[in-house]
Amino acid sequence: MTEAGLNTVNLSSLNTFQQVVLFLLMIIGSAIFVSAFVILVRLKAFEKEFVHVVRSAQHSAIPSLHNSPELGAADNSRRLGHISFPPVQGEFELSNSIGRAAPSTVVANIAEQHGVLPKSGSAPLSRSSHTASSSIASSIDLTNAEREELGGDEYKAVRLLSWLVPLYFVLWQLLSCISCGWWVAAHRAALTRANGIGPWWTGVFNAVSAFNNNGMSLLDANMTAFQDAYFLLITMGLLILAGNTAYPIFLRSIVWGGWKLLPNSMSDTKQTLRFLLDHPRRCYTNLFPSQHTWWLAMSIICLNGVDWAAFEILNIGNDEITQLNGGIEVIDGLFQALAVRSGGFYVVAIPKIRISLQVLYVLMMYVSVYPVAISMRNSNVYEERSLGIFAPIEDLENVEDKSKRDLLLRRRSTFTTLSRVQSAGGKIGRAFFVRQQVRAQLADDLIWIVLAIFVIMIIEGSQFERDPVNFSVFNVIFECVSAYGTVGISVGVPYDNFSFCGSWHKLSKLVLIAVMIKGRHRGLPRAIDRAVQLPGRDHAGALAARHHHPLPHPDG
């Protein structure tokens, strides 16, 4: 579930049912699967709120609006606004629209169509008719057109993502399962059967494990058995990127490509795609603005390039690597570079590579989540606004509630000085925000890893004294960092093929499980994210509304 990929037993020794359970857990634990579920929850919350708004029209002053000639004349020009749900009591008020709020006449017209309100110009509701309309309101079934009219572009964008993200998730794995399963069955069938595993099942399992960045393989030798399998290594390397670090890049490319290629006759869909490109972080946590997406792409290229170059350079003179021919060594180095930061597979046994490269891998596993996490937090301008970074000091002082004002001022001072934000127009503040996030992330990670290593070394003290080479402090550090980064590569043990943690005591394994769970959640936003807020719980937009300043543009 944590996608860490460390196996304490050889997976080939498991029965078919246990392997299928692992297969399903890899899918359910995927970050894309979880995010798709959140999108569906938001979509249902929107639709539930629409019904609530239409029902509320019965108890509001909306019927009197039909008698206003000004509103009647302006009806056609205002029908396409976004819905704005009523404020709620609490720390922050609700504001759910980027542009205009849905006009009262829009709600009134929809309420009329569903019998919640009397037709315009008809007599007021009597007590009996009021009771009848209440009964009708309890069973409102809005059409898609009415939902779009109430929800505006944001609702349409969330609805588009509700099928685009699951389709991305399913198609990548379905096509890769077919291709990898076919290749293994055609070229390595004898190898898999010698391990007691069917070739098709081996290819399917590896494909899903690669896409979900799990790193588990049904073959005890992991990917070392496929060192010369160009097709399989390249395909699985692409899956590792598509399912994790490069997912925001691929998703934005799909949205941008759809916006560019769709014909003008599909103007409504193109407008929704344009909205996603302009306001990605309002709708989805893993869809970033253009600038942040390019930064993420460059980060991935640089980090993987360093890993690839280090594999080739630091292993010069290493017989385990130089015995491979030139083409295989290059492809193996590329695959290992892609796998070491999140994929969890290893194409060469980790203990057989240079110790300097092992140290580099520890560092890369440690920072594996940073490019995506920092892009997510830095692009979340709604979170930054809620922290007071872009709110002018005079506005903070105008907050009537002293406790709320003090809280915002304390949060603001945590990230940057007031003079820096005022003098730099927010740009230096954002850069400082990134640096502060990196420092906070490093400090938070270090505490957990050091504590875990300390406790595990206490528990495994007897084994260290018995076998100081295999139970060295570095090997424990490597295993803990791999678990915390949810990577899954391991130095292993010399007498078997399972991960190093498989030789630990049960209490040490429980400590490592806690490390995995903590590491699995370190890539989440630091505060409640706008892209996962349900209608009625938006705090950042409310802060902007309270201070009478518009939110900064997500791309700016």
Image (cartoon, helix red, strand yellow):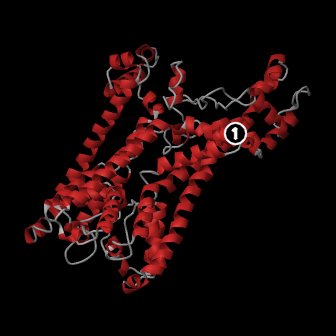
Of residue 169 and residue 111, the one placed in the foreground of this image is 169
Q: Work out which residue is located at the far right of the displayed protein and give it.
A: 122
Q: Is residue 522 visible?
A: no
**Residue for badge 1:** 50
Q: Nearer the viewer, residue 255 or 388?
A: 255
Residue name at image x 40 percent, y 85 percent: 190
Neighbor class of circle 1 (other Cα within 10 Å; few <14, some 14-19, many 20+) is many
Q: Which amino acid type corresponds to the residue marked 1 in the rendered image?
A: Phe
User: Does residue 121 appear anywhere in the picture?
Assistant: yes
* Whether residue 480 is situated above or below residue 220 in the rendered picture: above
Q: Quadrant of residue 174?
A: bottom right
- In the rendered view, would you say 357 is above or below 195? above
Residue in the picture at 48% in, 45% down: 286
Point out residue 471 in the picture as x, y percentages from the top left corner: 15, 66
**Which picture quadrant has residue 365?**
bottom left
What SS does tag 1 mark? helix
